[in-house]
Amino acid sequence: MTILEKWGITAIQLTEMLENNPSLRGMMLGYVAEHKLKEIISVIPGVSFITKFDDHNRKKKGDLYIVYKNRAFNVESKSLQTNMIERDEESGEWIGKAQVDGSDRRDVFFSDGTKLNTTLLLRGEFDILAINCYAFENKWNFVFARNCDLPCSTFKKYTKKQRAKLIASLIPVSWPPKNPFRSNLRSLLNEMVIAGLGQNPEKVE
């Protein structure tokens, strides 16, 4: 039995609800994107394990945990901000921004002894950022970048050390992708394995 049958609504009614409630549509899009991303990763040769940790497990950072060529990587999945999308009529290039932060605030400690309560994500908190570009062309294209290549926060009220550790909350994204993003996750994983990045796979119950 499908959820539509359980709730006693039609596909058209569900579509209308999503169209009329942007927050609901955005939340559902994020979960669909995770599902699509998992499908993409699962067919990459060399991927031996993939799982999604509980959303409320703060000890497990990243939306998907994967093992590739005996190295483990945490992949963070994010979406474009639909109200920030433009298309260059001359080049045909799509330009937008993705909101790359956490869903809740927590205390973050820095090497200079300071502390912040923030939703911003950290350098090293996950390994790979995956951004779905569905909002550009209504196609499930993704772009990928290493955590360490993402831009830092530029908020002037933060100290220099804090800014260096915090990832910017809005990150420019284009299609076709530009540095530091790429569309081929397998090539990125290969480079990271060669560079000795990733972790030793842990036992997952």
Image (spheres, rainbow, N blue to C red):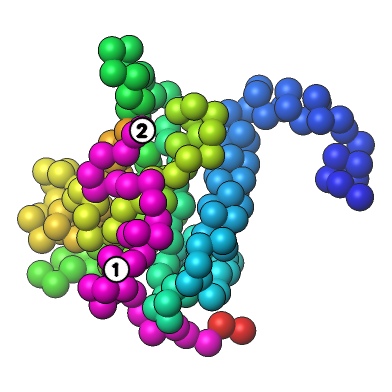
Q: Are marks 1 and 2 in contact (CB under 8 Å)?
A: no
200 vs 167, left or right, is right
Q: Amino acid at mark 1?
A: Met
Whether residue 85 is visible? yes
Q: Position of residue 143 (x, y in %)?
A: 39, 45
Q: Residues within 10 Å of mark 2 (few under 14, many from 20)?
A: many
Q: Residue at x 33, y 67 (%)?
A: 190
- Secondary structure at numbered mark 1: helix
Tag of residue 175:
2
Task: Measuring from the top left, give residue 105's x and y in whole percent.
Answer: 39, 56
User: Which residue is disc 1 drawn over?
Assistant: 192
Kindly identify the residue that appears in the image at 46 percent across and 52 percent down.
Answer: 77
Q: Quadrant of residue 99?
A: top left
Residues in magenta?
Answer: 175-203
Q: Quadrant of residue 111?
A: bottom left
The amino acid type of the residue labelled 2 equals Trp
Q: CA distance from mark 1 to mark 2?
A: 23 Å
